[in-house]
Image: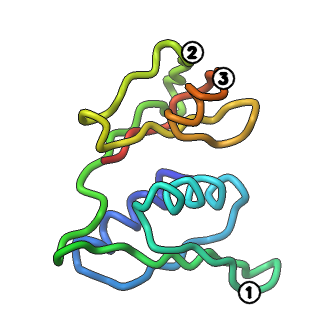
């Protein structure tokens, strides 16, 4: 699940690793593509064939610090949080993003507001 991927990325940045490998899933790949598009990670690449397919994530550092300084999980298995596009607010005065699962796929908050679509609020990252 995406929570394991985020935890692995946070732990790898804490010890200044260049990359991290995570098991492949389409949902995780979509989330990592959003993070790549918004410059929280350098790149994401699919490696291997199907029973042992992985995602290799290249981490981004600026001035010796990781690009991801914090994150907050909004939806869990026990509590799903759904929001409309009008309820989305900037995270950390616009320096962070919210990631949503919408009918149009995995989107960040700015794209969801632009396309006027709401959905399940997965997590905030800054």
> Crowding at label 2, few (<14), some or many (≥20) Cα neighbours within 10 Å?
some
Q: Earlier in the sequence, mark 2 or mark 1?
A: 1
- Which residue position is annotated with label 3? 117
Residue 28 position in % (x across, y down) = 62, 57
- Which residue position is annotated with label 1? 48
Q: Is residue 80 left or right of residue 61?
A: right
Q: Quarter-wise, where is residue 72 in the image?
A: top left
- The reply to whether the C-beta atoms of the residues labelled 1 and 3 are less than 8 Å apart is no
Q: Is residue 39 left or right of residue 21?
A: left
For the point 29% across and 72% down, the residue is 13
- Which residue position is annotated with label 2? 84
- Which type of secondary structure does the marked residue at label 2 adopt? loop
* Cα–Cα span, label 2 and label 1: 38 Å
> Crowding at label 3, few (<14), some or many (≥20) Cα neighbours within 10 Å?
some
Please, is residue 116 above or below residue 54 in the view?
Answer: above
Q: Nearer the viewer, mark 1 or mark 3?
A: 3
Residue 50 position in % (x across, y down) = 82, 78
Residue 63 position in % (x across, y down) = 17, 75
For the point 58% across and 36% down, the residue is 111
> Crowding at label 1, few (<14), some or many (≥20) Cα neighbours within 10 Å?
few
């Amino acid at each position: 699940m995406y929570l394991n991927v985020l935890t692995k990325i946070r732990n790898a940045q804490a010890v200044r690793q260049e990359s991290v490998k995570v098991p492949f899933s389409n949902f995780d790949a979509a989330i990592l593509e959003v993070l790549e598009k918004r410059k929280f990670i350098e790149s994401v690449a699919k490696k291997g064939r199907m029973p042992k397919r992985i995602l290799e994530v290249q981490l981004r550092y600026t001035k010796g610090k990781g690009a991801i300084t914090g994150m907050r999980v909004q939806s869990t298995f026990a509590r799903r949080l759904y929001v409309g596009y009008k309820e989305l607010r900037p995270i950390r005065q616009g320096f962070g993003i919210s990631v949503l699962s919408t009918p149009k796929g995995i989107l960040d908050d700015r794209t969801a507001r632009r396309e006027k679509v709401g959905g399940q609020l997965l997590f905030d990252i800054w």
